[in-house]
Amino acid sequence: MTTEQAHQHPGAPQAAADETPSRRDWWHSSHPTFAALTGFFTGMLLVTVLPGGFAAVLRLLFDYETAEKYFPLVLVLLVVPAALLARRKTRRFGQFVFVGMVLTAVVVLGVVSLVLYFMVQADA
């Protein structure tokens, strides 16, 4: 052991370990697949979970009429992806957030329309 290694903190990695990539380097390297997947699923959550959660919180805090009056404030959530698109560093992530939002809305509206169509056909 050299004197330089003896003066290092016991938990500090050695110089040879600094040259090899660590297991957590993938997290900080902005891997394109990681940004795409997290952006897409963030967009899905923005469309599905957050409006329902916002409505539930409003309903817990206020009576029905007041909660109904304040529910359109959920549209403020659209500012978040727009702000992501404005900055160059987060633009790619913001694009995938919008893709996730749009595709989720299309799938939900498509399923609702098919279910309504089959329910009306079965009732007739």
Image (cartoon, rainbow, N blue to C red):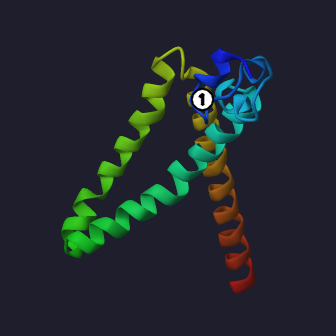
* Residue at x 63% of width, y 42% of height: 100
Amino acid type, mark 1: Phe
Residue 88 located left or right of residue 100: left
The x and y percentages for residue 115 are 69, 71
The x and y percentages for residue 87 are 47, 17
Q: Element type at marker 1?
A: helix
The x and y percentages for residue 19 are 77, 17
Q: Quadrant of the N terminus?
A: top right
Up the image or down, 30 lies above or below 48; here it is above
The residue that label 1 is drawn on is 93
Up the image or down, 122 lies above or below 2; here it is below
Residue 70 located left or right of residue 19: left
* Residue at x 72% of width, y 65% of height: 114
Residue 81 located left or right of residue 37: left
Viewer-side residue, 106 vs 48: 48
Up the image or down, 12 lies above or below 76; here it is above
Q: Quadrant of the C terminus?
A: bottom right
Q: Quadrant of residue 2?
A: top right
The x and y percentages for residue 79 are 39, 34
